[in-house]
Amino acid sequence: MLRGIGDDAAVVRAGSYAITSVDAIVDGVHFRLGQSSPEDIGHRALASALSDLAAMGADPGEAYVVLIVPEGFGEAAALELHGGIEALAERCATTLAGGDVVAGPALAVCVTVVGWSESPQRLIGRDGARAGDLVGVTGSLGASGAGRAILERRASGDAALVQRHLRPEPQLDAGRALAAAGASAMIDLSDGLASDAAQIAQQSGIGLEIDLEALPLAAGVADVARAIGRDPLEFAASEGEDYELCFCAPAERRAAIESAAAVSWIGLASAGPAALRLVARNGERRLAGYEHSL
């Protein structure tokens, strides 16, 4: 940073190629005041934006934050929210370079993040998967959806699931490691595997078949899913906001991928129609991803 907060604009000298993403979260749609603390909201806003950089395999750089504050939110709460952003930014080597604060009808946080890469060949999109590629995911699935169900009092469960919902972690290190190890396509799981993996299939022009039995469910997810009358595997595949990474990689890169990051292999790419198939022992499942709604 040559110039940042305090001037009319930021001046940055950084890498050769900029990777930019914009994300916004709004009270009543992406979170609910009363269920999330202001610090949780700040963390979540930056984490969801940084997750897009993780999916590209980019290095984090700068963040620009617009905070829309409703009447009655208060200065102390606004500073707490900003503290949540600052803490995650520091941990993720991200510079808060500017932004704005305005009044509005509902609390909202809009974050623009800029990442960097010395070479476009180091970056991974959604369109590089090829027939024969393996499909994998980082981490475990279903935790955020389970945490949301617990917060909404639809089920009881471990506090760790609630934490996974309130404080998702952008997989920046894993994204860079997978890109370097030979991943061919990648996406972050913001809307759920059933929706996000379909984006890889469509943009790569290949078929993806996912084995639901192979999904790595987070501890406690199955119990929460059953408590609300859901099949655990379908729940893990359709609930969003886990912010793990789904990726494809050539079979010959399997060992390199496994050395680069903790992953689970869940499917295979084929030359079939550009579509996603979700299969289990009792046949194919048709699922939609998670939709944010009021």
Image: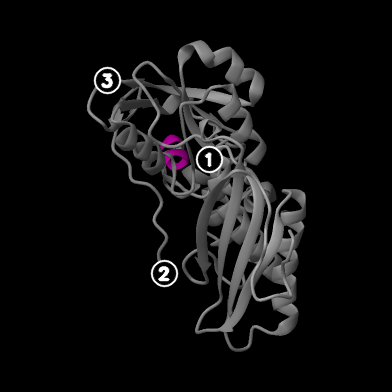
Nearer to the camera, 106 or 64: 64
- Disc 1 marks which residue? 55
Q: Is residue 236 magenta?
A: yes
The amino acid on which the numbered mark 1 sits, given as a three-letter code, is Ala
Q: Which range of residues does the magenta coloring cover?
A: 233-237
**Of residues 289 and 188, the one drawn nearer to the viewer in this rendering:** 188
| Residue 35 visible somewhere in the drawing | no
Q: Residue furthest top?
A: 252
Q: Which residue sits furthest left?
A: 273
Q: Position of residue 5 (x, y in %)?
A: 72, 71
When the figure is inspected, residue 108 is found, relative to residue 213, above or below; the finding is: below
Q: In the rendered structure, which amino acid carries the disc numbered 2? A: Leu
In the image, residue 276 sits, relative to residue 182, either above or below, namely below
Q: Which mark is residue 294?
A: 2
**Residue 155 inside the magenta-drawn segment:** no
Position in image of residue 258 (x %, y %) = 61, 19
Between 13 and 51, which is closer to the camera in this rendering?
A: 13
Tally of marks:
3
Could you tell me how far apart the alpha carbons at marks 2 and 3 are, in whole angstroms? 39 Å
Residue on which the image places disc 3: 271
Report the side of 219 relative to 192 (left or right): right
Circle nearer the N terminus (1, 3)? 1
Q: Nearer the viewer, mark 2 or mark 3?
A: 3
Q: CA distance from mark 1 to mark 3?
A: 24 Å
Q: Is residue 1 left or right of residue 235?
A: right
Residue 119 place in picture, x, y as percent? 57, 34
Q: Residue at x 73, y 58 (%)?
A: 1
**What residue appears at the point 62 percent right and 58 percent down from the top-left corner?**
46
Q: Residue at x 41, y 36 (%)?
A: 126
Q: Amino acid at mark 3?
A: Ala
